Image (spheres, grey):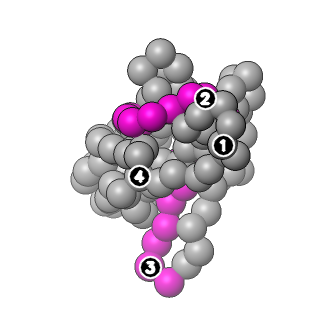
Amino acid sequence: QVQLVESGGGLVQAGGSLRLSCAASGSIFTINTMGWYRQVPGKQRELVARITRSDSKDYVDSVKGRFTISRDNAKNMVFLQMNSLKAEDTAVYYCHFNLQTTRWRYPTDYWGQGTQVTVSL
């Protein structure tokens, strides 16, 4: 069983910064991609940033230049540094891992429980 635990959300003023962390625990053979998604009420969950095992990174256009995703493979962790936050960044942020629990299992998607990020004007 794999669990993802997030931390680092909260309330911040516009222009401020927050750093989200997500740690995976349990039986993990290899992690393919790690990422962060966000969701606001009434809208679909959207990809914010993603990082592959080869360290390739993708960002949604609205956060490019402000957010940075990174990973610590030894600790099975992913981070999202969020700078110059805007009110429109307010959402519940979810971490996502695509991983294999054993050599013989297909990759599976796992999600964190979500952490609220609120940016005030």
| Separation of marks 4 and 2 at Cα, in angstroms | 18 Å
Is 102 covered by the magenta stretch? no
| Separation of marks 4 and 3 at Cα, in angstroms | 18 Å
Q: Which residue is mark 1?
A: 105
| Separation of marks 3 and 2 at Cα, in angstroms | 33 Å
- Camera-nearest label, 3 or 1: 1
Q: Earlier in the sequence, mark 4 or mark 1?
A: 1
Q: Residue at x 49, y 20 (%)?
A: 72
Residue 112's disc is: 4
Crowding at dot 2, Cα within 10 Å, few <14 / some 14-19 / many 20+, comes out as some
Q: Which residue is mark 2?
A: 30
As drawn, the residue found furthest toward the top would be 74
Residue 41's disc is: 3
Q: Earlier in the sequence, mark 3 or mark 2?
A: 2
- Camera-nearest label, 2 or 1: 1
Query: Could you tell me which secondary element the residue under label 1 belongs to?
Result: loop
Position in image of residue 103 (x %, y %) = 66, 31
Residue sitting nearer the eye, 55 or 68? 55
| Separation of marks 2 and 1 at Cα, in angstroms | 11 Å
Query: Could you tell me which secondary element the residue under label 4 belongs to?
Result: loop
Q: Earlier in the sequence, mark 3 or mark 1?
A: 3
Three-letter residue code for mark 4: Gly
- Camera-nearest label, 3 or 2: 2
| Separation of marks 4 and 1 at Cα, in angstroms | 21 Å
Query: Could you tell me which secondary element the residue under label 2 belongs to?
Result: strand
Three-letter residue code for mark 2: Thr
What's drawn in magenta, residue-wise? 23-42
Question: In the picture shown, does residue 68 fall above or below 94?
Answer: above
Tell whether label 2 touches label 4 (CB within 8 Å).
no
Question: Secondary structure of the magenta portion, mostly?
Answer: strand
